[in-house]
């Protein structure tokens, strides 16, 4: 949707007025900037003086869930790191063929001409880094993000902005390549934008809401930079981005894990930013479930797609953000209170998702035999789901071996669709138990044509068609069947798939998906998404040179090359979250 950048009265802005220090060569010219973000007396140079911690040796004979991540990944992930030999194993359960040659530092994937390596990197790597660097956005000569897309053949609309969720794979790529400055700048900039008053018409949004995106305007005459944020007032449907705050917390933890720079997270402003986000999520209300109630279009699926309620994508990101916040918050003052609330919510949320969102063959058979109109706390069919509402496709789709977290669970409703982000992030956050994570990987292997196809990865499955499409999407011309968010294939999801595969000990799945991507993605101009049941066709409205498609590929390659990078985005299982015992109803039919 176009964003009228000339009408600034309805948008949130941050303006700089000091003389420009230079003109960048990228899409957005850097210019002058006042001391708005440095008025707290922060010594940025001192904060960057972080000593890298020693790396632990890598063992490839067990999956990540069979041992603590701390055994595999040390807290010091900053570059440079020494070269190390990795053990090659043959079992598919033991990271089969993870590295067939000695491990090379991830910097080798940059494709810089003056670097010498023991192998010839794929030409897509060099092209990808060149394109990623061209997408950089500057604010007073400092990089603060990457624009969504650089397609010269299409109107920019809002693709010339820095989106919080879109920047995450770019940030991970720069962190893995030993370039944390842009990530730090982004975190501080978006943190400052959080403090701006956010209004839509006559209504003021919550103080903790993070922007969906921002844009930098440079005035060469006045030599000023202006940062304009969108908190949903310009989005399709005017929906606030629930996921932005979660991604910000997750990225802050990734930055700290990569650099060892705890000073940034310990800043009073960062601590306050985290608590403001958590306040929005942990406030008391009328909720009877620990999950978050959300509007349609509040996350990556940003158009009407029937996810209103408790979408699995938001719940997985919520869980990941809570666990990340638990690591980042200081156990004193307000932070101590929030840590207690986080523990309580994590326990309830993990049980709720694992118990009620999980679907495998046995659970499907149970739901198929549900009785209805059950009362009391011993009811098995707690949400009064009518078995006849189970769609026909799910009986054929769900194999005997495999399972996944369904899209939504609410009163009298189960959305049986597959959502990639929710399931991949459930694995990375350890919201999924080890058995559930393995079952999700089994599902990928059993249903490769449906979920991976010719171009990874289906964001949702299956597509809404006919009457369902008309009712659920409101006849959305962009979300037609097997296109965009309605069953489209998104290359950016490759990085999540790769991380999840490595964590579960099934890197061969990721390698196969990456090989498929390398056959077409660069040749097709790095499209935003692909259409069709198998993802064979460049999306009819897909932008070319989509930045997160580029970054997603680079991150996937670097993680497969150096699995220790998983420590930035993966969390080991919390053994304290034990599954409570349930009392089954007398009406249960075995």
Image: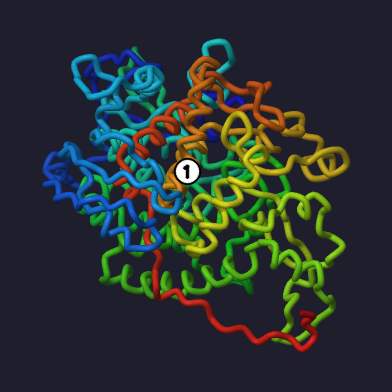
Q: Which residue is mark 1?
A: 496
Q: Position of residue 151 (x, y in %)?
A: 52, 16
- Image point (44%, 57%), residue name: 429
The answer to whether 531 appears left or right of 512 in the picture is right
- Name which quarter of the figure residue 142 lies in: top left
- In the displayed orientation, state which residue is furthest to the front: 90
- Image point (34%, 63%), residue name: 67
Quadrant where the C terminus is found in the figure: bottom right
- Name which quarter of the figure residue 339 lies in: bottom left
- In the displayed orientation, state which residue is furthest to the top: 153
Above-or-below relation of 575 to 277: below
The answer to whether 388 appears left or right of 383 in the picture is right
Q: Position of residue 168 (x, y in %)?
A: 42, 39
The answer to whether 431 appears left or right of 570 in the picture is right
Q: Choose between 190 and 358: the one closer to the eye.
A: 358
Q: Position of residue 146 (x, y in %)?
A: 40, 28
Q: Choose between 179 and 105: the one closer to the eye.
A: 105
């Amino acid at each position: 949707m176009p964003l009228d950048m000339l009408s600034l009265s309805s948008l949130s802005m941050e303006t700089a007025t000091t003389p420009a220090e230079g003109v960048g060569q990228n899409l957005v010219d850097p210019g002058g900037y006042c001391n708005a973000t440095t008025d707290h007396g922060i010594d940025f140079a001192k904060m960057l003086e972080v000593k890298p911690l020693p790396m632990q040796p890598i063992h490839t004979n067990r999956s990540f869930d069979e041992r603590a991540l701390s055994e595999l990944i040390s807290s010091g992930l900053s570059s440079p790191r020494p070269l190390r030999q990795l053990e090659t194993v043959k079992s598919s359960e033991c990271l089969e063929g993870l590295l067939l040659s000695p491990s090379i530092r991830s910097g080798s994937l940059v494709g810089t001409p003056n670097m010498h390596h023991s192998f010839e990197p794929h030409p897509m790597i060099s092209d990808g880094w060149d394109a990623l660097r061209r997408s950089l956005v500057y604010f007073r000569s400092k990089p603060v993000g990457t624009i969504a897309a650089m397609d010269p053949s299409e109107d920019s609309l809002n693709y010339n902005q820095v989106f919080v969720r879109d920047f995450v794979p770019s940030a991970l790529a720069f962190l893995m390549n030993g370039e944390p400055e842009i990530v730090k700048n982004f975190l501080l900039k978006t943190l400052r934008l959080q403090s701006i008053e956010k209004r839509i018409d006559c209504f003021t949004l919550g103080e903790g809401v993070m922007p969906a995106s921002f844009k930098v305007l440079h005035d060469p005459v006045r030599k000023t930079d202006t940062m304009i944020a969108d908190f949903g007032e310009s989005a399709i449907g005017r929906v606030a981005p629930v996921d932005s705050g979660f991604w910000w917390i997750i990225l802050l933890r990734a930055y700290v894990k990569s650099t060892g720079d705890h000073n940034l997270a310990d800043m009073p402003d960062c601590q306050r930013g985290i608590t403001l986000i958590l306040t929005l999520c942990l406030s008391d209300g009328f909720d009877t479930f620990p999950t978050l109630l959300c509007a349609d279009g509040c996350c990556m699926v940003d158009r009407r797609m029937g996810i209103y309620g408790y979408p699995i994508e938001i719940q997985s990101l919520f869980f990941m953000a809570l666990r990340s916040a638990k690591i980042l918050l200081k156990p004193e003052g307000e932070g101590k209170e929030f840590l207690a609330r986080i523990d309580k919510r994590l326990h309830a949320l993990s049980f709720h998702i694992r118990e009620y969102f999980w679907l495998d063959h046995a659970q499907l058979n149970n739901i198929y035999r549900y009785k209805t109109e059950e009362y009391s706390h011993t009811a098995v069919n707690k949400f009064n789901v009518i078995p006849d509402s189970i769609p026909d496709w799910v009986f054929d789709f769900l194999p005997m071996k495999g399972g996944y977290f369904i899209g939504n669970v609410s009163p009298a409703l189960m959305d049986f669709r597959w959502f990639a982000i929710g399931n991949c992030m459930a694995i990375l956050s350890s919201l999924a138990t080890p058995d559930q994570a393995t079952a999700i990987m089994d599902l990928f292997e059993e249903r490769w044509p449906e979920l991976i196809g010719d171009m990874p990865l289906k964001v949702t499955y299956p597509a809404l068609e006919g009457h369902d499409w008309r009712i659920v999407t409101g006849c959305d011309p962009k979300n037609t069947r097997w296109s965009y968010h309605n069953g489209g294939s998104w290359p950016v999801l490759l990085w999540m798939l790769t991380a999840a595969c490595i964590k579960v000990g099934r890197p061969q799945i990721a390698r196969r998906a990456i090989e498929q991507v390398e056959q077409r993605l660069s040749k097709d101009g790095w499209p935003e998404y692909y259409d069709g049941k198998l993802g064979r066709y460049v999306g009819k409205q897909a932008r070319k040179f989509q930045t997160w498609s580029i970054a997603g590929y680079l991150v996937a390659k670097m993680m497969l090359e150096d699995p220790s990078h998983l420590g930035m985005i993966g969390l080991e299982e919390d053994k304290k979250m034990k599954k409570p015992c349930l009392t089954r109803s007398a009406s249960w039919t075995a």
